[in-house]
Image (cartoon, grey):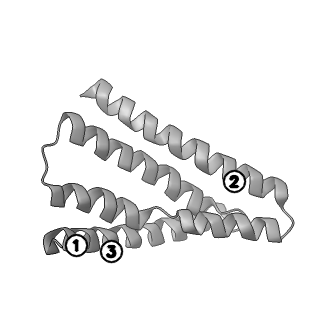
Amino acid sequence: MNLQLIAAVALGGAIGSVARYLVGIGSGRLFGMAFPWGTLIINVTGSFLIGTFIALFAIRWDLSQAARVFLTVGICGGYTTFSTFSLDAFYLMERGELLSSAAYMIASVVMSVAALVAAIHLVRTVG
């Protein structure tokens, strides 16, 4: 068990969780609470961020394992919210908003994967 890696994940997770909270609050204020915009925005931007990190690790950044774990498992893991995504989808279904729930689930998955691919492509193109 590597205590340096555990500390990197813990610190990154704290940062990512606070960022998730702030983005969720800000999204709610901007767009309202009828649709889980905050979670959708967090999942898409988190996917873009982890895609950027992974691409940069591959072509530009020669970082230690602790730094890589801090950024990906820590910050991105603390920031993204697929457990909350599942709960939001359930609540929409429970309220009888089946179309909104389906749109939310499809948009979350498709846009998050697209954001990751876009980030990798962007970094490869610019780099």
In the shown orientation, is residue 41 left or right of residue 35? left
Q: Quick one: label 3 or label 1, which is nearer the N terminus?
A: 1
Q: Please identify the quarter of the rendering in which residue 57 is found.
A: top left
Instruction: Please state which of the two labelled residues, at mark 2 or mark 1, is closer to the viewer.
Output: 1
Dot label at residue 14:
3
Percent of width and height locating residue 20: 45, 67
Q: Number of marks in the image?
A: 3
Residue in front for this viewpoint, 81 or 23: 81
Query: Looking at the picture, which amino acid does disc 1 mark?
Result: Ile
Residue in front for this viewpoint, 103 or 27: 103
Percent of width and height locating residue 84: 58, 69
- Taking the spot 76% from the left edge, 52% from the top edge, the residue there is 102
Q: CA distance from mark 3 to mark 2?
A: 27 Å
Dot label at residue 104:
2
Please say if 51 is above or below 84. Answer: above
Q: Please identify the quarter of the rendering in which residue 94 is found.
A: bottom right
Residue holding disc 1: 6
- Taking the spot 83% from the left edge, 70% from the top edge, the residue there is 95
Q: Residue furthest front?
A: 1
Q: CA distance from mark 3 to mark 1?
A: 12 Å
Percent of width and height locating residue 97: 84, 62
